């Protein structure tokens, strides 16, 4: 939001062009600086609405974490009460990922058709129905159906929550607010691990419905995304929502003008389907969005997260101590990332995170290599603890949440639905692939598995340096104009 003296000077017209400075703000060079008029003092009422709206949205992230964290503490109780075999329970656990892939496919279009609030409504209805199916399950069919429905819900939530938060927050705090998504996922998983050891699996399923119900209630009291309202032509509601988010005394004329001008320009260009997404001018954001999700998942995340106990056990370290310490490190690291992202920027955190994850994989692989050489057991177990903690701590600092933040920032509103669905689907397919292949790789070679993941993380560092743009402190319209104008300039 700009000062009143600049109300008739659209920011996009003042933005530096790629052919003038030759840069678009990649990690390699730090990017160009786009001049703007200093904003007026922030409105406390506007800040409180943004905070409350973001907290309501990330209730969905917490529900996401609950769903992911449910299967581990509930395993023994469900298998004993319903007589499931290990194979049947494995199907139950993996069905969540299958449902998430199904939910990811239409996630962008659903958010475009129903709005961001409507999409969150739909996703929570899926989650609540899934939890209730598990709560009242008498056999494996109801369990799997409930897990599949929950997966569909979190597949949609994983897209719409960061997009909504990114679209309502001011540029100077957008990274921190959007990072709450990853923090709440971690807290949701940790809560399930903790409470799951104290209550019955049916009670745990009932508890899982609470954040879903809380978000459904909160959605009545938060505004719709102004950028979505502008896209669908609801101008009065757009201005009212933006004014509410920025405060009743804030001057929104400049920000409203920028959003409307850019949205209108995109509306005249295309309708934003898959064919439009595959045009050259969207090649850079598409490569960055898809690439970050590939490196996020294929660097071994689910191998470390889903098989933490198996890794510690194979190395001769206490699984109880190891998993507790790992959970604490993940929460602390994610919290640190939230505090740093709007100060350091996206790219520095991504680079530190990917490099640290690579180092963690090397340490873990080295520990099992030494085990094969029959080195002292104490050294092996200590090194595997260091490796796992370095990987998880580094990963949660940046690679865990920032790819979702950048995804929500990079794509213009006219292709955000199609692009978001594609990027979301790639993430969940990668998640399933690593979960499915880890046990086979680990059986083939414990050390080799983690050295493969280390090479993927190392490639991710190069990818970030060469291709990922820095988006800190820039409006979404500035980011979109910078990237697409650069691609148009390269094409000409």
Image (cartoon, rainbow, N blue to C red):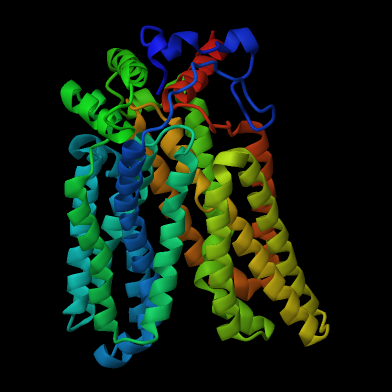
Q: Residue at x 52, y 50 (%)?
A: 338
- Could you say where residue 89 lies in the image, as x and y percent from the top left? 35, 80
Identify whether 484 is placed above or below 388: above
Of residues 150 and 249, the one drawn nearer to the viewer in this rendering: 249
Q: Quadrant of the N terminus?
A: top left
Of residues 294 and 13, the one drawn nearer to the viewer in this rendering: 13
Q: Residue at x 56, y 52 (%)?
A: 337
- Could you say where residue 141 lies in the image, as x and y percent from the top left? 20, 76
Q: Using the rendered image of the protein, determine whether residue 421 is visible from the camera's viewpoint.
A: no
Q: Residue at x 56, y 85 (%)?
A: 320
Q: Quadrant of the C terminus?
A: top right
- Could you say where residue 423 lies in the image, as x and y percent from the top left? 42, 42
Q: Residue at x 70, y 74 (%)?
A: 384
Name the quadrant containing residue 205: bottom left
Q: Using the rendered image of the protein, determine whether residue 478 is visible from the camera's viewpoint.
A: yes
63 relative position to 174: left or right: left
44 relative position to 150: left or right: right
Of residues 475 and 113, the one drawn nearer to the viewer in this rendering: 475
Identify whether 290 is placed above or below 374: above
């Amino acid at each position: 939001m700009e000062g009143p003296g600049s109300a008739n000077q659209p920011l996009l017209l003042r933005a530096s062009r790629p052919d003038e400075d030759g840069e678009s703000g990649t990690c390699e060079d730090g990017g160009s600086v786009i001049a703007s008029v200093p904003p007026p003092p922030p409105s406390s009422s506007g800040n409180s609405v943004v905070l409350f709206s973001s907290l309501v949205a990330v209730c969905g992230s917490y529900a996401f974490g609950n769903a992911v964290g449910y299967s581990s503490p509930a395993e023994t109780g469900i298998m004993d009460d319903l007589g499931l075999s290990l194979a049947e329970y494995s199907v139950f656990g993996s069905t969540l990922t299958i449902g998430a892939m199904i939910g990811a496919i239409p996630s962008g279009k659903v958010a475009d058709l129903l709005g961001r609030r409507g999409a969150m409504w739909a996703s929570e209805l899926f989650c609540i129905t899934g939890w209730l199916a598990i709560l009242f399950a008498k056999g494996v069919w109801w369990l799997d159906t409930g897990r599949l429905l929950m997966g569909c819900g979190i597949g949609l939530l994983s897209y719409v929550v960061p997009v909504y938060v990114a679209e309502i927050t001011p540029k100077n705090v957008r990274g921190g607010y959007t990072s709450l998504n990853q923090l709440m996922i971690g807290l949701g998983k940790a809560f399930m691990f903790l409470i799951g050891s104290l209550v019955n699996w049916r009670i745990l399923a009932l508890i899982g419905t609470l954040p879903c119900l809380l978000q459904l209630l909160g959605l009545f009291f938060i505004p719709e995304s102004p950028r979505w309202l502008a896209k669908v032509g609801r101008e009065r509601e757009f201005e009212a929502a933006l004014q509410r988010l920025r405060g009743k005394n804030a001057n929104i004329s400049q920000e409203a003008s920028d959003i409307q001008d850019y949205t209108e320009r995109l509306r005249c260009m295309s309708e934003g389907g898959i064919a439009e997404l595959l045009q050259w001018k969207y090649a850079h954001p598409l490569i960055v969005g898809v690439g970050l999700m590939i490196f996020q998942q294929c660097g071994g995340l689910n191998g470390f997260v889903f098989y933490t106990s198996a890794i510690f056990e194979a190395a001769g370290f206490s699984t109880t101590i190891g998993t507790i310490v790992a959970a604490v490190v993940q929460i602390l690291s994610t919290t640190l990332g939230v505090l740093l992202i709007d100060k350091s920027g996206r790219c520095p955190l991504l680079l530190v995170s990917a490099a640290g994850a690579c180092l963690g994989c090397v340490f873990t692989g080295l520990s099992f290599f030494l085990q094969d050489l029959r080195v002292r057991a104490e050294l092996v177990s200590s090194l595997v603890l260091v490796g796992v903690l370095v990987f998880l701590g580094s990963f949660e600092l940046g690679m865990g949440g920032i790819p979702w933040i950048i995804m929500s920032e990079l794509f213009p509103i006219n292709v955000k639905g199609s692009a978001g669905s594609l990027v979301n689907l790639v993430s969940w397919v990668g998640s399933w692939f690593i979960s499915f292949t880890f046990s086979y790789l680990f059986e083939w070679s414990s050390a080799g598995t983690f050295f493969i993941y280390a090479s993927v993380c190392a490639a991710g560092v190069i990818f970030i340096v060469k291709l990922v743009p820095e988006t800190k402190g820039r409006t979404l319209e500035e980011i979109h104009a910078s990237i697409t104008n650069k691609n148009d300039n390269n094409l000409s």
